[in-house]
Image (cartoon, rainbow, N blue to C red):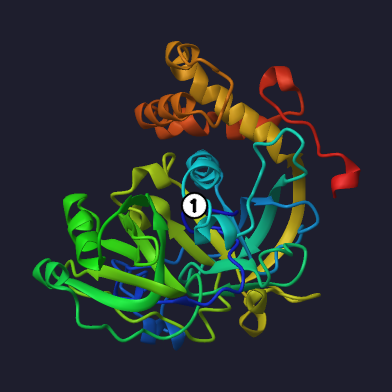
Amino acid sequence: TQTLTMMRGLVFGAAVVVMLQCVAGQHGRDPFAGSGCDCDSFCNHGCSINATGPEVMTTYRMTPAGALDMLNKNTGDPNGDTSFVLSRRTTAYECRHGNANSFFCKGMTQFDGDDSNSTDLVQQWDIQIDGNWGPYLYCNPVNSSDPLGAWDCDVTIGGGGSPTPITPPAQCAATNFSVYNDFCWVGYGGETSSTADAGGCCAAATKSHASHFTYFAGNKSCTVFRMAFNARQCTGAVSGEQARGPAPPPTCNCSRVHQAVGRENLTVAMSGYKSSHPAGGLWYSFPAQGECHGSQNVGDNNCTWKTKTLKRTIRASCMYENLDANVVAHDPSCFNGCQQPKNVTSDCYLQCYSSATEDMTHDELVAPWGKAFASSDPTQGGCPEAPKYML
């Protein structure tokens, strides 16, 4: 699945992305926390992250037509992929009407399942796994403009070392910001304004209770982020991050990490950012190095997963329509009060959408997902099989 969202299936390309302090661990937190396992023991096959044992699990993948295998791909459970779809509504709006030149809009393949003419798909897979979970990996096309080409999984949304901080402006030093030259933040909730200098941008970030900022002296633009998880090389920019608590542990990166099926609990990983996971849920990663081949069984030669059955493939546009209709039905008076009630990119529609999703329970938000795959009958909330020309 492609996220924001957040971070699942963000489908980032080969742009150079660099970890700063807040993302020294897997996007800023310890994936082993509370599991009784740590990186060293995991890499030596001494433990796993809350192991559950072997099983055949049903999982879902949202994908461009043609990218239909599971090698180096991310998937989700119904709640996880529902969260992805709902949060993408906001991301798509920001790309069309906000920072259109941002890395989110230009450095990643845009999933367009909400377009009725889209050929994007949702697959339902049964996959055999060993249940010895590892850290969640980010699986994306090597070239973001070619999602039908090679894919890769990594421990972060990019690679690279940590840049050296520069002497911060006085306003930044006073509020505990570290500052770096020639890097731009990748994050959510970016708000852009104009400030006279980088120090003014620090002040703007502090006023907005934002922990990260990126400033361009050329046009005096200051973008502050409430959540940022990586930075990319970006000539002419000055970026800052505010130290808040101890730094996370170093990223765990060994051969077993790239063999294990990864699992991410969105409610835990994105704690404090409910808009990024309105329905909660789980995301998974299936690195190619862990696939079982031919007659191999899960566990043979350290293989960790094996596809069993592709159960159904439906058009993503059908799923989007059903999920949107479910949100609209929760508060129809709000949507009907919009000048263009069916304009899904209007400010009014998105305000109603955000308000409704915040008010709905996880079970209410995810209900259309199960119905879409349980039946092919639209009158029962089902989605028909995708036409063969898309497969």
Which image quarter: residue 116? Answer: top right
Q: Position of residue 181 (x, y in %)?
A: 34, 79
Any part of residue 26 in sight: no
Which image quarter: residue 175? Answer: bottom left
Any part of residue 47 in sight: yes
Q: Position of residue 190 (x, y in %)?
A: 37, 52
Residue farthest along the left direction in this orientation: 174
Q: Nearer the viewer, residue 21 or 377?
A: 21
Q: Secondary structure at mark 1?
A: loop
Q: The N terminus appears in which quarter of the rendering?
A: bottom right
The residue identified by callout 1 is 5
Residue farthest along the right direction in this orientation: 389
The residue at the point 58 percent across, 78 percent down is 259
Instruction: In the rendered view, tell whether residue 202 sits above or below residue 325.
Output: below
Give amino acid for label 1.
Answer: Thr
Q: Nearer the viewer, residue 377 or 163?
A: 163
Q: Position of residue 163 (x, y in %)?
A: 35, 84
